[in-house]
Image: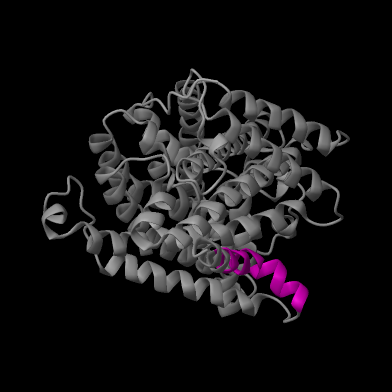
Amino acid sequence: MENIGLKRNLKARHLNMIALGGSIGTGIFLGSGYALHVAGPAGAVLAYALLSIMVYFLITSLGEMATFRPTSGSFCEYSTDYVGPSFGFAMGINYWFNWAITIAAEISAAAIIMKFWFPDISPILISSLIFLLVLFFNVFSVKIFGETEYILSFIKVAVIITFIILAFALVVSKPSLASQNIFTADGPFHQGFYGFMSVFLIAGFSFQGCELIGISAGETKDPQKSIPKAVRSVFWRLILFYILATALIGLLIPFNDPKLFIQDSVESSPFTLIFMKFFGQGLATNFINLVILIAVISAANASMYASTRTLFSMGQKSQAPKIFAKTNKYGLPIYALIATALVGSAFLLSAFSKNENIFSTLLTISALCGFIAWFGIALSHFKFRKSIGEDKVNNLKYKSKFYPIAPLLAMIFIVIIIAGQITQFDLNLINILENYGALIIFIALIIIHKIFSKR
């Protein structure tokens, strides 16, 4: 096994689409309907808007650090160097675990989508086939991965833009329907504060992947130019693909449509519901479901990439076995990929073995891990500026516009969101472990690492 390290074979266009494609998947196509159902149209849009601002703050923070020091370890490595080794170790485990879980979540969603055409097919069989397809995309050089993700993401972006245009035309042509959907029952803020807080985990899962800009920096040509360019475009993409799309969905279908709550069918997707309602169950509906399937496979593809590179970086830092830092002649961290694939498939199989809502469970776990990771980005940036000194800060090629307000506000907002989830379930040990288990493990990892590193 050769060990030539990662190769910088990703171009600026790959970086843009990886960052965009990683955050357009199950969350927006399936999760947005559930968000609309629990919070109403105004509650869902407000939650997505607030998270968009927070995520933009985080991406500008990450962009500054990644431009200064591009590495596949991204903020996990920055956490180690600027916050502390124990915090960085826990952050690396959390982020690797997060994407391994997300692989399972996305592929379980793909099995749900396939039921639209093949209602009697085994979900384990179809999930296994899709898992092998995603693995296939990742076993070659990063250039192959980049081209695959570029094509898949381009399809997703084109279809969402088309959907927004069609949805806007429908809203204009049926203004009475739009007002009726907004104010039906107790809308537009369904369930008040409770519903509003319920949306944040779902929305958080949707936004995960924007931070792939940092992971991809270690394999990108000319990162000092391509990273700032990708970061600057994030804000408008967040507005277009999340806030505007969610607002239009809320105008076209009532939030209390019972199908939005059924998460074991692609018909819970608001995109599918809108196409079925206005265009019938024909070619158009089949097409949008195919696009949703492509989006999910693309997101699983990005998840496999991110998880593998995180484990590779941990191997380089001796935070994981050194074997994970080895690469083959194509610059692929093959052992990190194998380990990630095994863990992701184990989560997927264990989820299918339980009699519960697979997608919802995996989404909750992954979303909390994602918020922990975002907290790490904000804290790392805050410490980063203090660590490098004033001279280097003044010479940064890309500088976050809102420091120190942005990382501080992001950390406060994340703490409020995580703490606020306690209002969403009955207080007992099982529910606490299910909803806060990832946070408990994260804190435990910091403590354990501190204890053993002193010996």
Q: Is residue 335 left or right of residue 351?
A: left
Instruction: Report x, y in % for residue 20.
Output: 43, 40
Q: Is residue 237 above or below residue 408?
A: above
Q: Can you tell which quarter of the image residue 223 is in?
A: top left
**Residue in the image at 29% along x and 50% along y:** 65
Q: Give x and y (percent) for residue 178.
A: 53, 59
Residue located 55% across and 77% down the image: 419
Q: Identify the image's colour scheme: rainbow, by chain, secondary structure or one colour.
A: one colour
- Residue 354 lies, in percent from the top left, at 85, 53
Which secondary structure is most common in the magenta stretch? helix
Which region of the structure is painted magenta? 429-445
Residue 170 vertical position relative to residue 4 in the rendered view, above or below: below
Q: Residue at x 73, y 53 (%)?
A: 263
For this rendering, which residue is in front, 60 or 292?
60
Left or right for 401, reference 195 = left
Any part of residue 291 in sight: yes
Looking at the image, which residue is at 65% across and 59% down?
A: 365
**Which quadrant holds residue 185?**
bottom right
| Residue 178 located left or right of residue 406 | right
The answer to which of 90 and 294 lies nearer the viewer is 90
- Residue 452 higher or lower than 20, as above or below: below
The answer, for residue 118, to whether it is visible in the render is no
**Magenta span includes 439:** yes
Given residues 294 and 343, the one toward you in this image is: 343
Number of numbered tags placed on the structure image: 0
What percent of the width, then of the height, locates residue 58?
36, 57
Q: Nearer the viewer, residue 35 or 423?
A: 423
The residue most toward the bottom is: 427
